[in-house]
Amino acid sequence: MRRQLTDRFCAGAKARDGEVQTDYFDTQVSGLALRVSQSGHRSWTFHYTLDKRRRLTFGNYPSISLSSARTRADEARAAVAAGNDPRLTTTETLRDICELYLAREGYKLRSAEWRRGVLERHVYPTLGQRPIAEIRRSEIVRLLDRIEEQSGPAMADQTLGIVRKVMNWHATRSDDFRSPIVKGMARTKPSERPRERVLTDDELRKIWAINNGVFGSFVRFLLLSAARRGEVAGMTWAEIDGADWTLPAARNKTKVDLVRPLSKAAQDILQMPKQGEFVFTTDGTTPISGFSKFKAALDRASGTDGWHIHDLRRTARSLMSRAGVPSDHAERCLGHVIGGVRGVYDRHEYHREKARAFEALAAEIARIVEGGSAKVVTMRRGKQ
């Protein structure tokens, strides 16, 4: 279908009824088309003839704007006029391919937004603008070195897995691309994944005994809520309604609202002066961050080491089992989706059961920390 493409049209374009996908050919630049699928994904394609009819895909909308798409199409037309195949001369960047992959495959992935976040934090700043066909294995190795130094080997491996998936996907769609990633590039051994670290009672007592302001409250709340670090860090006062904390679907990996009925101990932590939108903040404007610095100080003060913040969630889950909380209830407290037929038909909110589970968790933590002889240590506060 031919029509003059505009930004307004591209933003709202839909596939025509009865078609899996629709190509809207631009009347301004010959060969350029906006391909729209029934799921709403939009990608740019350039159609040309060079001994036979061919198609070049070079990114998705709106990551690549209409004006940029027209420029790329003009460059491809010039290559064809010179007798060259634009698929071999195109300068598709790694970011272009990652965005195209997420646009076409992301709706199938529960973790699509998490993957996008990893790419934006760890990959795009270094390799995002590099032509994907020119990226060398040594560049990826240096990228992984930096991630390992800054965020640990597990994050390096997670990033490697995402980039490997994107590059392998691109290789299935390209005549010439070969992924530079090979076996042996991971930074951890399979036996080390996933982590199974759970804090001991002694470690829990030592960590709980440290009063270091916002981060100390943050750590205690993580244990009492069994939530993920990012969920608590981004928690706003607007998400709290009485004893209930509702994690909105937009911030939940499962993309559904999750209600956590907080225990009395967790509610007590929230009895703090409000400093802006976020519950846990050091500047009154942005969510708490700088976790490595805060945790290093906590490790020194408590005499603990070898644990990660995410281990607190695993520890909380183990303590629920120790406290006799039924597995189904504990899993729902963590926000895990119950699979199988039960997951489809059992829509009970389990609010009362989750409330009892969180109180049982709080009681178990209290039994541990009050049963030891740990002395509360108040750390000298920096900026709160």
Image (cartoon, rainbow, N blue to C red):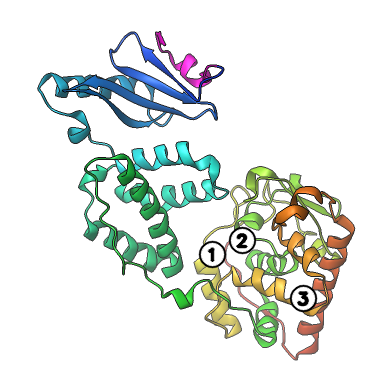
* Residue displayed at 70% across by 78% down: 208
Residue at numbered disc 3:
321
Residue placed most toward the observer, 248 or 369: 248
Among the 4 quarters of the image, the one containing residue 378: bottom right
Question: Which region is colored magenta?
Answer: 1-16
Position above or below: 13 against 96: above
Residue 333 in percent (x, y) is at: 76, 61
Position above or below: 228 against 207: above
Nearer the viewer's eye, disc 2 or disc 1?
2
Q: Amino acid at mark 2?
A: Arg
Res. 240 visible in picture = no
Q: Amino acid at mark 3?
A: Ser
Residue at numbered disc 1:
291
Nearer the viewer's eye, disc 3 or disc 1?
3
Marking on residue 185: none
Secondary structure of the residue carrying tag 1 is: helix
Residue at numbered disc 2:
229
* Residue displayed at 40% across by 21% down: 34
* Residue displayed at 38% across by 59% down: 160
Q: Which quarter of the rendered picture does the N terminus lie within?
A: top left
Q: Amino acid at mark 1?
A: Phe
Res. 108 visible in picture = yes
Residue 259 in percent (x, y) is at: 78, 52
Among the 4 quarters of the image, the one containing residue 69: top left
Which callout, 3 or 1, points at the residue further toward the start of the chain?
1
Which callout, 2 or 1, points at the residue further toward the start of the chain?
2
Position above or below: 125 against 192: above
Q: Residues within 10 Å of mark 2 (few under 14, many from 20)?
A: some
* Residue displayed at 48% across by 41% down: 105
Q: Which quarter of the rendered picture does the C terminus lie within?
A: bottom right
- Image-based side of 12 in relation to 224, left or right: left
Say how many tags the image has.
3
